[in-house]
């Protein structure tokens, strides 16, 4: 591996606009930043990598004026820089677009774009002028179709992200920090996001891009800086040519060989889940599959191919137009029947669909088995906590504090809480939709161990993932889905990434299916 201070050795971008030297930030009991080094040039996309807890969020909040560095030096445009408020950072030309977009839903696009520095005259907001300026910025971003007076709450996720960028440009930002900007976007929306980023950098604007998806780093990044435990472990690496093994090693301290747990031969057994001819018009058609105890079956396919809808229909959350789902020979007709038969599901949107974020971990874990802790009309909270703590130990939840709100956990540990809920409920079949979305590489490895451990204990697992290496590395058997149809099935060891991508893009019908 290269030295952390090594340069890419290329002329990527222009002159340095931002430089951090030995930056330290300490919170009570935690040294979040421990001598961070970072250099960002004009007109480049500088990618920031690191596991959850590596210091990325703290770093961007220091740049945004939310936190103040305890020591070290920050220079911006060649001058010392220490913004005391987010407004000061914005005025200086640094804009931050957080993963959880900080827009006001009940305000218009234009009002959000100029929030905090409204165009006014004689104390009155100039709405017409703001709308005209917003229209110009939206056109610059390639989205003149977004009406400046539309309420933000009526926009899709991609539209809201465009509004956040418009706000940044309304401040004449010279540096835009993007925290996991693709997390809520479909494939075509990510392509549009990258187009916008390239146009911004062509105008000399610098971008700090944070993502867990290494494929995105390759496509959009120029240089990469890696953080681990609050320290810079690699700086200014070339994004396109640095081996994945090195990036993962810098983030986790472990090599790629240990990311996926070893497969073990699944015991021969009759399937617990049998799906036959399942169809929902306009979403997927004639889906037939089976999963046996101790087996992990992965479904690979593009966003919009019908994968998530298929999983939700198997769980009973969507009503099928035709076909059947049976668990242990008994038909599943709704969520209640699915849970009663031992089916659990961890949805893609765990924060909005699976977790009570402000409730403690133990309440989230016992949600599916709550009746088991109720006696005579009263809940035995002590038993709830004890059961949740045993599950937290089993899943290596960090921290192992079942009384803390679920909101305070990292993405990987939140996913463990959702899985733990179904473990407590005695689940026989676990449905996982994008199980590692928004989860860093190190936490992913832990989740993979958890999932493989469940299969080793006899739980059947059916998972959906947009990341082909994840499906191939974790599943025993792979189904490929394209345009609402299952088009191929094979043991994972008989497939490679190129083959699966070809099937996902071009498709090949299963034997015996009509063309």
Image: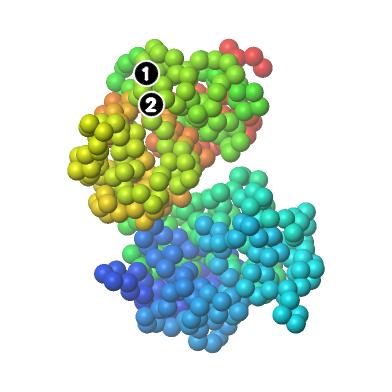
Using the image, tell me which numbered label, if any, was put on residue 347.
none
Q: Which quadrant holds residue 169?
A: bottom right
Q: Which quadrant holds residue 472?
A: top left
Screen quadrant of the N terminus = bottom left
Q: Mark 2 points at which residue?
A: 339
Horizontal and vertical percent for residue 178? Answer: 55, 62
Q: Nearer the viewer, residue 345 or 497?
A: 345
**For residue 375, above or below residue 100:** above
Q: Is residue 425 visible?
A: yes
**For residue 510, above or below residue 186:** above
**For residue 117, above or below residue 329:** below
Element type where label 2 sits in the image: helix
Find the distance from the CA under tag 2 to the CA under tag 1.
14 Å
Count of numbered labels shown in the rendering: 2
Q: Nearer the viewer, residue 13 or 400?
A: 400
Q: Nearer the viewer, residue 71 or 238?
A: 71
Horizontal and vertical percent for residue 380? Answer: 21, 39
Q: Nearer the viewer, residue 61 or 460?
A: 61
Disc 2: CA contacts within 10 A as few (<14), some (14-19) or many (>=20): many
How is the model colour-coded? rainbow
Q: Name the residue under label 1.
A: 272
């Amino acid at each position: 591996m290269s030295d952390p201070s090594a340069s890419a050795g290329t002329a990527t971008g222009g002159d340095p606009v931002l430089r951090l030297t030995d930056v330290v930030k300490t919170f009570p009991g935690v040294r979040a930043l421990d001598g961070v080094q970072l250099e960002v040039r004009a007109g480049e996309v500088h990618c920031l990598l690191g596991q959850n807890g590596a210091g990325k969020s703290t770093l961007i909040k220091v740049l945004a004026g939310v936190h103040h560095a305890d020591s070290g030096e920050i220079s911006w445009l060649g001058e010392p820089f220490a913004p005391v408020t987010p407004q000061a950072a914005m005025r200086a030309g640094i804009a931050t677009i957080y993963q959880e977009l900080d827009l006001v839903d009940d305000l218009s696009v234009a009002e959000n774009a100029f929030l905090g520095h409204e165009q006014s005259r004689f104390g009155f907001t100039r709405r017409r002028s703001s709308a005209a300026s917003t229209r110009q910025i939206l056109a610059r971003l390639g989205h003149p179709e977004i009406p400046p007076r539309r309420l933000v709450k009526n926009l899709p996720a991609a539209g809201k992200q465009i509004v956040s960028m418009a706000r940044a440009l309304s401040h004449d930002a010279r540096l835009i920090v993007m925290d996991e900007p693709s997390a809520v976007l479909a494939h075509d929306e990510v392509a549009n996001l990258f187009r916008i980023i390239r146009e911004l950098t062509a105008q000399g604007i610098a971008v700090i891009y944070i993502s867990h998806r290494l494929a995105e780093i390759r496509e959009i990044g120029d240089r990469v800086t890696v953080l681990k435990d609050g320290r810079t472990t690699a700086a200014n690496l070339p994004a396109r040519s640095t081996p994945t093994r090195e990036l993962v090693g810098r983030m986790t301290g472990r090599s790629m060989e240990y990311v996926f747990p070893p497969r073990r031969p699944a015991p021969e057994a009759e399937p617990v889940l049998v799906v036959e001819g399942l169809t929902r018009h306009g979403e997927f058609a004639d889906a037939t599959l089976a999963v046996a105890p101790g087996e992990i079956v992965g479904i690979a396919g593009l966003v919009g191919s019908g994968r998530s809808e298929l999983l939700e229909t198997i769980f009973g959350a969507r009503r099928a137009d035709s076909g059947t789902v049976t668990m242990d020979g008994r038909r599943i007709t709704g969520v209640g029947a699915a849970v009663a038969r031992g089916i659990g599901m961890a949805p893609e949107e765990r924060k909005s669909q699976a977790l009570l974020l402000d409730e403690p971990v133990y309440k989230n874990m016992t949600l599916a088995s709550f009746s088991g802790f109720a006696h005579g009309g009263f809940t035995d909270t002590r038993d709830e906590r004890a059961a949740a703590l045993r599950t937290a130990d089993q899943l290596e939840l960090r921290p192992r504090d079942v009384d803390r709100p679920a909101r305070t956990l990292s993405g990987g540990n939140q996913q463990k809480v959702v899985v733990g809920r179904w473990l407590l409920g005695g689940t026989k079949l676990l449905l996982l939709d994008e199980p590692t979305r928004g989860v860093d590489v190190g936490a992913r490895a832990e989740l993979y161990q958890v999932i493989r451990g469940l299969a080793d204990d006899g739980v059947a697992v059916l998972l959906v993932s947009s990341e082909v290496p994840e499906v191939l590395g974790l599943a025993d058997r792979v189904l490929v889905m394209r345009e609402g149809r299952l088009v191929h099935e094979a043991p994972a060891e008989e497939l490679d990434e190129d083959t699966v991508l070809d099937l996902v893009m071009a498709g090949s019908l299963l034997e015996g299916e009509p063309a």
